Amino acid sequence: MRFVTAALATIITAVLLSSPANATGAAPIPENDPFFEPPADVAQLEPGDIVRVRTVQVKAFELPIPVDAWQILYRTSDRRDRPTVTATTLIVPRAAWRGSGPRPVVSYQTAEDGVSTRCAPSYALTAGLRGGYTGSYSEGPVVIAAVMQGWAVSVPDYEGMESQFLVADVAGKAILDGLRAVRDFTEIDLSDSPAAIWGYSGGAFATAAAAQMQESYAPELNIVAVSLGGLLGDVRATIDAFDGSVAGSAVPMGMHGIDRAYPELQIRERLNPLGQRLFEQTADLCLFEAVVVRPFLTVAQIEAEPGMLDRPEVAAVLQENSPMMRAGTPMAPVYEYHALFDEFAPIEPAQRVLRNYCDAGVDVQHQTTLLGEHLTEIVLGIPGALNFLNQRFADKPAKNTCARVPR
């Protein structure tokens, strides 16, 4: 806990020094960028159909990366299956693929974690530090690590244009439809490429959502591997982990994602005056910005009536969006890496998700780290994830450690 407090203090300092309010010359955020406008005939398009494309220069932090890159706007759907659009950033190495078969594609889900399109990877990968210090920005080097394997990497804005944070249906569809769009992109032929999906923390939540809905939503996709790091297995358990912590004010920020997807819950009306003020104050923030607002905030301090999260209608929505409660299991082998003492993504719910997968016959490899916590595991877990994906793309048998996953 001492490490994470120091790390978050460093992040907070970075946010204060580099927030968009202090940045100059930043590109327009997606919601103000005409490229992201849905076409009038969006309802006539099929999920994954490409709307428009543009070439972009991507960066890892402030370093331009010598790759070919495009932003692809495509049709997807919201929670109620209403047509909408989102984008993915496709990054392809310029060197020829030297492996066997077609060049693989990895859909990497950054920890988009936030309720503004400023938090989206399409913005972070092109605006750089001018766009502010976000989860998507901080994971640029992970994206490049995947590109350096020779893979094409698709990085979707899986929260959509309304930044619906922690809404599983929105995230899952956006990821799978993004792979459909990449498959159909004619600038480079990836139509027969094996694919993998990978993400850490909030990105793992989105990745699990896509993996669990693939069989019913996009069974035609050739997804051969699923890599999850620091998986948020249960939304309520994650809220409880943040509750009262140094990052406590991320909770009212996160409520906006659910509020936008489930307006019938009337989240704002369930908050007391302090809660309503913080709800408004965090309405356009990313996670690292939100933790500055009021560290050590508790849910009890902002709810109008005790037990707001236990109300049946609220609890049902949290369960509906929790991987361990959702139907479906992955069609491909799964690798999950997790710090044993993860303070923000408790390991027990993640293990329950993996047990569900194991019981359905999925090959699962579960890797735990004894020393470290949520932030350190982002880095410590990269080599294992890359090795797992390389083995799947080489068509090697998947390791199965289901016998060691607790019940």
Image (cartoon, grey):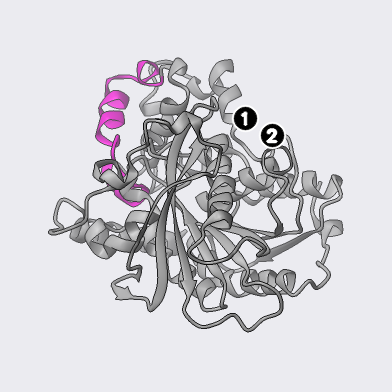
Q: Is residue 339 something that shows in the picture?
A: no
* On screen, residue 285 above or below 194: above
Indicate which disc, 2 or 1, sits on the residue closer to the N terminus.
Answer: 1
Q: Which residue is mark 2?
A: 325
Q: Visible in this render: residue 233? A: yes
Q: Quadrant of residue 311?
A: top right
* Horizontal relation, residue 356 to residue 133: left or right: right
Part of the protein shown in magenta? 267-293
Question: Image height check: is 297 above or below 304?
Answer: below
Question: Is 285 or 156 nearer to us in this picture?
Answer: 156
Q: Amino acid at mark 1?
A: Gln
Q: Residue at x 67, y 63 (%)?
A: 192
Identify residue for label 1. 319
Q: How many marks?
A: 2
Check whether the beta carbons of the residues at disc 2 and disc 1 lie within 8 A of each other: yes
**159 in the magenta segment:** no
Q: Amino acid at mark 2?
A: Met
> How far across and how far down the image is residue 307, in percent?
50, 20
